[in-house]
C-alpha cells in the first residue's frame, strides 16, 4: 500500500470514519494502532514483530527512567538528613543514567545491526573473510534486511528516552505509546516527532473544522502532485541518465544532477505533505519538514529549512550535547563535522546498494561547508563592509549560487553512493561528449523532450519555487479553503492522467 494509490485512499477514508465514529479514547487509539499495523504490514509484514519488540523495550525503559528519581518517601521524610537525601538522590541519578545508556545502546545497536550488520557477517558467496574462516554467513542475509523506516523509528525512540531523562512526561499507557510509535502517516519516513508533543495533542483532540479538513485534503492533493506528477517523471530521466552515464555527455550529467535534486525534494516533501494531510484528517498536526530549502543563501540556513525535523534532532541530541558553539570556534567546527558524518552514517547502509562510503562523503562535504560558513561568519563580523556586501543583491545572488551549487553537487554522492560511479560523474562534468544515440534513446524516445525543453522545465521549477515563496512570505497570499477543495479533484485527475504508469518508490523509504 503506497500513499498514491486507490487502496490507500480507501484505507484512509475507512480509518477516518471509524476513528471519529468512536467516542472512547482507548478505542480510538486501539483502532489507530491496528490500522497502522495493517498499513506497515502491507509493505513489510515480517518486520512488524521486531518493531513491536522495540516499542515494548523503549516503553519499559522510559517508565524506568522517569520513575527512578529520588523516592517519594525520602522527599516526605523531614527527619532525613541532608547527607542521606543527597546520597539517595545521587544513587537514583546513577540508575537513571545507566538506564538511559542501556536504551541508547539498544537502539543504536538495533539500527547499526540492520544497516551495517553485513560488514560483520559477510556472505561467503562474495568470497569474503567468512570463507577464510571456513564458515558461510550467507544464511543471515534474509534476516539482516532493514525494516522500512528503522532510522526514523530509532531516532524517535532515542528522542523519547532522552526527553524523559531530561524531565519530559513519560507514557504510562502502552496503548497510547504504541499508537504514537506506529502512527501510520509518519511511520516509514517521518517527519520525526516527539512523544510529549503528540500526547499534548491527544488531550485536546477534536473533530477538525471544515477549513482544517480542506487543508488536510489540499496537502494530500498537492503532495500527490509533487510525488506522482513531478518527482516520478523527473526520476525517469535521472534513472536513464545515471544508468547510462558512460554514454551521457557533460551537459546531460549536469541536467541529471539538477533533476535529481528536484526529484529528491519533491519526492520527500510530497510524502510529508500527504502524511501531514492524513494526520490532520485524524485530528493530529505533524511538523513542517521543508521550508523552501533551495532558496537559501547559506548552508546553515539550508539545514534549518531542509528535513527540518532531522536537523532539529541532530541539533538537540547530538550538537548541543557535544558542546554546540559554547566551547570556542575550533570545538564548534569539530562538532559540526561529527554531526554531519553521523548524518551520513544514518543515511547509509552496507546491507543493500546504499554504499555507506558515498553517504560519508556527502556528510563530510556538508560538514566542511558548515565549517567554512562558520569561519566566514567570524571573519565577516570583523569587517562591516564585508557583511554589507554579502547582504547586497550581488552578494545574495552569489551566496545563493555557491550554496545551491554545493548542495546539488553533493547530491551526486547521495544518488550514486558507490564512489567509483560518483567519482566518474564528477570527473566528466566538463567537455565530455555524449554518445550519438543517447539523445535519441533518452530524450526523444523515452521522455519526448529535448535537452532545451528539459532545461526550461527545470528552470520553470526554480522560478515556481521563487514565486511560491514570494506569495507566501512576501505578499502573504494563500488560497482559502473553498478554493483548495475545488482544486483537490483537479490535482488527483492530473496525477492519474500524467504520472508514470509504475510509480517509483519513495526515495527515503530506503533510509
Image (cartoon, helix red, strand yellow):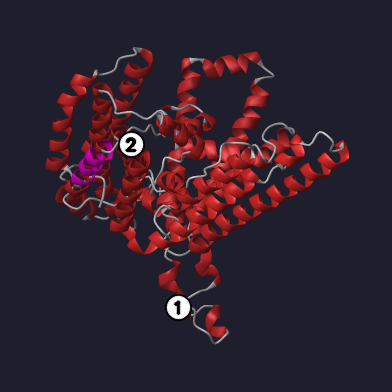
Q: Position of residue 148 (x, y in %)?
A: 39, 55
Q: Residue at x 22, y 50 (%)?
A: 503
Q: Position of residue 24 (x, y in %)?
A: 33, 38
Q: Residue at x 45, y 38 (%)?
A: 307
Residue 368 in view:
no
Q: Is residue 508 above or below residue 419?
A: above
Q: Which mark is residue 468?
A: none
Contact check, label 2 and label 1, Cβ < 8 Å: no
Q: Which residues are drawn in magenta?
A: 10-20
Nearer-the-camera pick, 465 or 58: 58
Indicate whether residue 241 is drawn in magenta: no
> Is 435 placed left or right of 307 in the picture?
left
Indicate whether residue 17 is drawn in magenta: yes
Residue linked to disc 2: 279
Q: Position of residue 378 (x, y in %)?
A: 67, 25
Residue linked to disc 1: 138
Per the image, label 2 sits on a secondary structure element best described as helix
Per the image, label 1 sits on a secondary structure element best described as helix
Q: Residue at x 38, y 45 (%)?
A: 183
Secondary structure mostly taken by the magenta-highlighted segment of the chain: helix
> Is 267 placed left or right of 389 in the picture?
left
Amino acid at each position: 500500500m503506497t500513499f498514491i494509490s486507490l487502496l490507500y485512499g480507501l484505507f484512509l477514508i475507512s480509518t477516518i470514519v471509524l476513528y471519529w465514529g468512536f467516542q472512547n479514547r482507548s478505542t480510538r487509539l486501539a483502532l489507530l494502532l491496528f490500522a497502522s499495523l495493517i498499513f506497515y504490514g502491507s509493505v513489510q509484514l515480517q518486520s512488524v514483530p521486531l518493531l513491536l519488540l522495540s516499542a515494548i523495550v523503549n516503553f519499559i525503559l522510559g517508565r524506568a527512567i522517569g520513575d527512578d528519581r529520588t523516592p517519594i518517601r525520602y522527599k516526605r521524610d523531614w527527619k532525613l538528613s541532608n547527607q542521606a537525601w543527597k546520597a539517595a538522590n545521587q544513587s537514583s541519578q546513577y540508575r537513571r543514567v545507566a538506564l538511559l545508556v542501556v536504551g541508547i545502546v539498544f537502539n543504536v545497536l538495533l539500527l547499526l545491526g540492520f544497516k551495517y550488520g553485513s560488514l560483520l557477517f559477510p556472505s561467503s558467496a562474495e568470497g569474503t573473510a567468512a570463507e577464510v574462516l571456513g564458515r558461510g554467513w550467507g544464511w543471515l542475509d534474509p534476516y539482516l534486511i532493514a525494516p522500512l523506516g528503522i532510522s526514523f523509528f530509532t531516532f524517535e525512540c532515542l528522542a523519547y528516552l532522552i526527553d524523559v531523562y531530561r524531565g519530559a512526561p513519560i507514557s504510562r499507557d502502552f496503548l497510547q505509546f504504541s499508537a504514537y510509535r506506529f502512527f501510520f502517516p509518519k511511520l516509514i519516513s517521518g517527519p520525526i516527532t516527539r512523544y510529549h508533543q503528540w500526547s499534548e495533542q491527544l488531550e485536546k483532540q477534536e473533530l477538525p473544522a471544515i477549513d482544517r479538513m480542506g487543508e488536510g485534503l489540499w496537502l494530500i492533493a498537492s503532495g500527490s502532485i509533487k510525488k506522482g506528477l513531478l518527482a516520478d517523471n523527473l526520476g525517469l530521466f535521472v534513472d536513464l541518465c545515471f544508468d547510462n552515464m558512460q554514454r551521457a555527455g557533460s551537459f546531460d550529467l549536469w541536467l541529471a544532477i539538477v533533476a535529481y535534486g528536484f526529484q529528491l525534494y519533491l519526492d520527500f516533501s510530497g510524502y510529508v505533505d500527504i502524511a501531514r494531510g492524513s494526520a490532520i484528517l485524524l485530528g493530529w498536526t505533524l511538523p513542517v519538514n521543508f521550508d523552501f530549502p533551495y532558496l537559501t543563501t547559506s548552508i546553515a540556513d539550508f539545514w534549518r529549512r531542509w528535513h527540518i525535523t532531522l536537523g532539529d534532532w541532530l541539533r538537540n541530541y547530538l550538537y548541543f550535547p557535544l558542546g554546540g558553539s559554547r566551547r570556542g570556534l575550533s570545538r564548534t567546527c569539530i562538532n559540526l563535522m561529527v554531526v554531519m558524518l553521523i548524518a551520513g552514517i544514518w543515511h547509509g547502509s552496507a546491507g543493500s546498494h546504499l554504499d555507506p562510503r558515498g553517504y560519508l562523503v556527502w556528510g563530510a562535504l556538508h560538514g566542511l561547508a558548515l565549517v567554512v560558513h562558520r569561519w566566514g561568519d567570524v571573519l565577516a563580523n570583523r569587517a562591516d563592509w564585508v557583511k554589507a556586501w554579502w547582504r547586497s543583491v550581488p552578494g545574495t545572488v552569489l551566496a545563493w549560487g555557491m550554496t545551491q551549487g554545493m548542495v546539488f553537487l553533493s547530491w551526486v554522492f547521495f544518488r550514486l553512493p558507490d564512489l567509483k560511479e560518483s567519482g566518474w560523474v564528477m570527473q566528466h562534468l566538463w567537455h565530455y561528449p555524449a554518445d550519438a544515440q543517447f539523445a535519441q534513446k533518452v530524450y526523444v524516445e523515452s521522455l519526448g523532450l529535448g535537452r532545451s525543453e528539459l532545461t526550461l522545465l527545470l528552470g520553470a521549477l526554480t522560478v515556481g519555487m521563487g514565486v511560491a515563496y514570494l506569495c507566501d512570505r512576501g505578499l502573504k497570499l494563500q488560497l482559502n479553503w473553498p478554493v483548495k477543495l475545488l482544486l483537490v479533484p483537479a490535482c488527483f485527475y492530473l496525477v492519474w492522467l500524467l504520472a508514470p504508469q509504475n510509480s517509483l518508490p519513495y526515495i527515503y523509504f530506503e533510509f
